[in-house]
Image: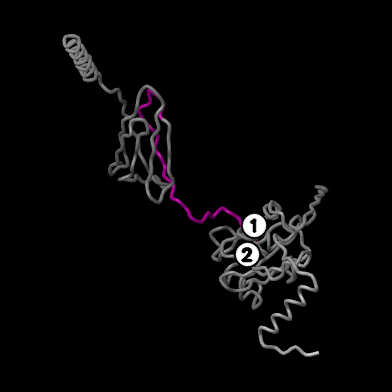
Amino acid sequence: MNKILRNLLIFTALLAFQGVMTLEAQEVQTATVTGQVVDEDGTPLPEITVKGFNLTSSTLTDANGSFAITVSPGKVDRVVISESGFNLIVMEVEPGRTTIDPVTLVKTRLIDPDRLTDLPYRAMTGDRIVGAVSVITGAELQSYPSDNILEALMGRIPGLVITPFNTMPGQENFGAAIRGNWAPIYIDGVPRSVIGLSASEVEKIEVFKDYSSLAMLGLSGSSPVIWITTKSGDRYDRKISVSAEYGFRTPTTLPSYVDAYDYATLFNEARANDGVVMTG
């Protein structure tokens, strides 16, 4: 038994030694890819991080924006170029490729100058808007089943607080406030109530949260404003849409009342306990 165990240990040791020698004999196959990183003006960018995906290699660009990084030669690899303040770039490197065309890093823009926002009296680009404006379309409102526009706005616009004043079915009444200030509601430029206004009639709702509304409405816009634009007809684009909804509301619990005799008896007992003298 001891001889068999000894032979088994020797065989295992020989296999392990052969595996180590095989790994040492093999060399990791790599390829080197070179390239350059520049900005939007073509100026070389130094100290930019460049990473390889398959081999998890990384390097930095030199003073001329050039870099050389190792990639796997037998299959498609990816090179990731990243730097704070610039958009991330991921490039694929096919097998056999040794150079990469100059890579242009684009600065991250928090404000898109090409984005056009339609304000009540004119359209402005993103770099011209200095106020806090939130916009929600009527199609988004229709995804929430509600018979009141303000109720459908709950939780959809940052900073907008909707307070219910009356929840009686058919007589619902809500108020809107932003940063503690009540916001008046304008529908197509006219101050009016939203009662009876359906979400299917709304084109968009704009919420002006600061004093940018003062420039449009004068003293009436001294507080946040909710501006509702309804849909209008289009020439040569006739379309008829019909929708029907129904619903019901019921209380979760109702109190149980006693009959008239028990009510009168308990009422008299309560007055007696309070020391009220019964007369008549």
The label on residue 44 is none
Q: Do the residues bearing badges 1 and 2 touch, measured as CB atoms within 8 Å?
A: yes
- Kind of residue at badge 2: Val
9 and 143: which one is in front? 9
In this rendering, is residue 114 above or below 192? above
- The percent position of residue 208, horizontal first and vertical second, equals 61, 66
Figure quadrant of the N terminus? top left
The answer to which quarter of the image holds residue 94 is top left
- Kind of residue at badge 1: Ile
Residue at 71% in and 53% down: 142
Q: Sort mark 1 into few (<14), some (14-19) or many (20+) by Cα contacts within 10 Å.
A: some
| 33 left or right, relative to 243 | left
- The percent position of residue 86, horizontal first and vertical second, equals 41, 48
**Circle 2 sits on which residue?**
207
Q: Secondary structure at mark 2?
A: strand
Q: Magenta segment: does it hold 79?
A: no
In this rendering, is residue 69 above or below 237? above
Figure quadrant of the C terminus? bottom right
Residue 188 visible to the viewer = no
- The percent position of residue 15, horizontal first and vertical second, equals 22, 14
Q: Magenta segment: does it hold 110?
A: yes
**Circle 1 sits on which residue?**
136
- The percent position of residue 170, horizontal first and vertical second, equals 79, 64
The answer to which quarter of the image holds residue 250 is bottom right
User: What range is drawn magenta here?
Assistant: 93-118
For the stretch drawn in magenta, the main secondary structure is loop
